[in-house]
Each structure stands twice: as C-alpha cells, then as structure tokens.
Amino acid sequence: MAVKDIVVHVDDGERAKLRLELAIELARRGDGRVIGLGVGPIVTVPAFVGAEIPAQVWELQAEEMKARMAAAAAAFRRHTERAGVATEWRELAPTIDDVGGILAVHARYADLVILGQPDPRGSRSGVDMEAVGQVVVEAGGPVLIVPYAGNFTELGKRTLLAWNGSRESARAVHDAHAILTKGAKITVMRVNPPGRDHARRDMASVDISVALARHGYEAEAAHVVAEDMKVGDMILSRAADAGVDSIVMGAYGHSRLREFILGGATAHVLRHMTVPVLMSH
C-alpha cells in the first residue's frame, strides 16, 4: 500500500534530518506528500509557582521557542527543497504541554506518522516517551519510531514481525504495507508464553506467514519460548540476529486520565530499539 500523506515530527535536533530522509523515501515510492509538523513544547508550572516567576522569564522562554521553531522550519525546507516530492509545513504552539495530543490529532489524517525515539543522553531531538505512547495509543494508524542513534539507509526490505495473533498485531500487519518493499523478507516471530497450546501457536505463525506470502513477501515462520528472557529482549535479540532493517509489532497500552501506560514489551522495545519500529494499536 503506497502512502500518500506522511506526517513527520520536525524539531531543531540533528536527528530530524534522518526522519525526513525516511519520509522522503517512502513518499517517493508512492508519489506521496511529506508533512513536516513543528510542535513547540510549552513548559507548564502550577499557578502558585507561575505567579512567582518574573515576566522576563516567560518572555525569554517564548523567544527561545520561537527560535527553535524557526530552526526546525529552516531544516525542513533545507532537507526537502530538492527532494522531488510534495511537501507541507505546519507549525503549532500548544498552550499546554500536549505535544503528544497534537501529534496524534494530525496523525489521524495521514497514512503514517514518523517520530523520533527520546534520547536518554539529553538531546533535544525526538519526543519524550509519554508523547510517543500517546501518539501510538491515539493515532488510529501506524506510527514509525526512529532510534536516537544509528543510520538507516534502507527500510522495509527485511523485517521482523512480532506476532501473537492479537488484534493489535493484526492491525500492525495491515499497516506494515506502508513501509514494506516489493518482495520484502519477513521473519514472523511468535514468542510462546509457557503453559499454552504449542500446536495452536505454531499454526498461527504459519497462517500469518502464508497470508503475507500471498502479498508477494518472502515470509518465514519462527517461534521462541520466552522463559529466560523478557519478551521485549527476545524481540530485539532476534531482530539483531536476523539483521533486519525494521521491526513491526502491535502496541499494547491504555490511557489513564492524562497518563499513557504502555505494555511491558512495547515500552521495552521503545526504550532499547536499534532499528526503526512500526507500531499499531
């Protein structure tokens, strides 16, 4: 499935270039459009604290945000002006700390949204884990998260599909067509929780592999037993062994008031990924 509208979160960090390059490549495959979305996070404090902060501090914050958004817009133009694809720039400044909510709303009108993994080293590139979780849970479509480190020149040629037969993983399989290339090689990995029916699990891996093969992909079924390692570790370990360029998996989580709780394997992969990960909820 060719993607026509790709939303990319663009900031003034160095990793924005890589996210844009991946978006441009996907747009070229299907004559699509790259939509750069600059969202300025606003620092919020309780009212009783805010009253004590001098007006000059708020003015300096506003000036810094204005400068950062200008830098993000310039980066978007610089990296897309000769790309040969249609582009659009959107710039938004939330009045509250709701970057994830704004990204999720815009994602619902696109075929794919691309985000950057939060950088634990303190870089300003990417969005924080709370925002990533909110977009994954609320977008209603595929979210491609790009690691904070590493270079990725290929996408969708060799993929690991983490499959457990759930609604979320089925959604991810359908959404994966947005990044898979023709004849892509897919390793379908079924992590077997102990104490279940092995025959049914093995058949499920074979069935989804056959379905993928009908779409022209080279799919192979594999299964592992997650007794000594966490499921997230098992997914990442198998991805490294197979030398894949991406991981496709269902995302598990829910919202509780304004807090977005991600499942253990989902959160683990998001924190420790070494290749781009496409998630669907």
Image (cartoon, helix red, strand yellow):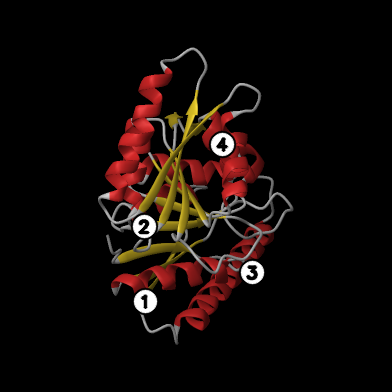
User: In the image, what residue type sits under mark 3?
Assistant: Glu
Say what amino acid the circle numbered 4 marks: Ala
**Residue 218 at x, y = what percent?**
38, 53
Quadrant of image for the C terminus: top left
Secondary structure at numbered mark 3: loop
Q: CA distance from mark 1 to mark 2?
A: 14 Å
The numbered mark, 1 or 2, whose residue comes first in the sequence reads: 1
Residue projecting furthest to the top: 195
Crowd around label 1: few <14 · some 14–19 · many ≥20 (10 Å): some
Judged left or right of residue 64, residue 94 is: left
Q: Quick check: 248 above or below 4?
A: above
| Identity of the residue furthest to the bottom in this view | 82
| Residue 275 horizontal/vertical position (percent) | 57, 54
Badge 2 element = strand
Numbered tag placed on residue 14 in the rendering: 3
Earlier along the polypeptide chain: callout 4 or callout 1?
A: 1
> Which x, y percent locates residue 253?
45, 31
| Label 2 vs 3, first from the N-terminus | 3
Task: From the image, tell me which residue sits under label 2.
Answer: 112
Marks 4/2: CA–CA distance? 20 Å
Which disc number belongs to residue 87? 1
Q: Amino acid at mark 1?
A: Thr
- Foreground mark, 1 or 2, reads 2
User: Is residue 33 depicted above or below 280 in this figure?
Assistant: below
Label 3 Cα crowd, 10 Å radius (few <14 / some 14-19 / many 20+): some
Question: Which sits in the foreground, 26 or 228?
Answer: 228
- Mark number, residue 267: 4
Q: Is residue 79 left or right of residue 68?
A: left
